[in-house]
Amino acid sequence: MVVSYVKNRILAGTLKSGDRLIETDISEELMISRAPVREAMRILNQQGLVTFSPRKGNHVIEMGSAEMMEVFEIRTSLEKQTLHKILRKQLLKEEDLRRLTKIALDMKDNEQTCQTEEDRVFLFNTLDLTFHKYLWELSGNVRRARILENLYYQLLIAINEDISSQEILERKSEEHLAFVEVLSKNDLPTVVHEFYNHIRAYVKATLPTEEKNFYLDC
């Protein structure tokens, strides 16, 4: 419950790097005791989303540009492996393509229901995670999928630090639809190249001066 609460705030862009997480405030807001809150902080710490110190308490992680680039590179490498497995074992069926298409269309179609920028950010980030998580789990690698989800949230915290980088939201529905189209052709080099460009857009938005250092051996 508490873990989901914190992650939903990350998805909505309301938790940013360095933000303090006060156990008493969370327990009062959720109307629960502090014990489950402390346990949730321990879990989030293990997932690399929260740091703890005896004097300062719990805080959302902070990453420098080098650390962020490392996370981008690790995520890209692991997700590339899942794509290799999906295509080489021909795990992607017509039903999977339809589901991915529906997720991508929902990014655009459901945006009109959002009343605030926070709603809009939450909608996109939730659907973006759902889209990629679908592929991670389709590959059948449970541990890799778990690691990728943790990396996703770590990067999202970094992106949330500068909400202006979310200006790319309007283009993301079409970008995901284009990726589904590429996936349907079952051509591994093309899929990997398209995925690289997909992630590179995030690198450019988050670390514009470091983009030239982001590479993927396609």
Image (tube, rainbow, N blue to C red):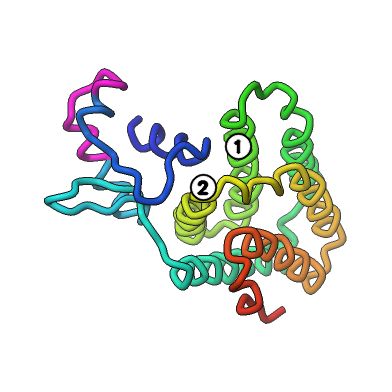
Q: Which amino acid does label 2 sit on?
A: Asn
- Identify the secondary structure beneath mark 1: helix
The answer to whether residue 142 is visible is no
Q: Quadrant of residue 36?
A: top left
Residue 23 image offset from top left, x and y in percent: 22, 34
Rendered view: 38 above or below 82: above
In the image, what residue occupies the spot 61% across and 42% down? 130
Q: Say which of 70 and 209 sits in front.
A: 209
Residue 209 image offset from top left, x and y in percent: 61, 71
Residue 126 is covered by the magenta coloring: no
In the image, what residue occupies the spot 35% across and 56% down? 48
Count of marks placed on residues: 2
Relative to 64, 117 lies left or right: right
Residue 39 image offset from top left, x and y in percent: 22, 40
Q: Which amino acid does label 1 sit on?
A: Val
Relative to 151, 169 lies left or right: right
Q: Say which of 21 and 27 sits in front.
A: 21
Q: Say which of 146 and 21 sits in front.
A: 21
Q: Write the start and end of the magenta stretch as one range.
A: 28-40
The answer to whether the residues at label 1 and label 2 have Cβ atoms under 8 Å apart is: no
**Mark 2, residue position:** 160
In the image, what residue occupies the spot 72% across and 64% down? 195
Relative to 70, 48 lies left or right: left
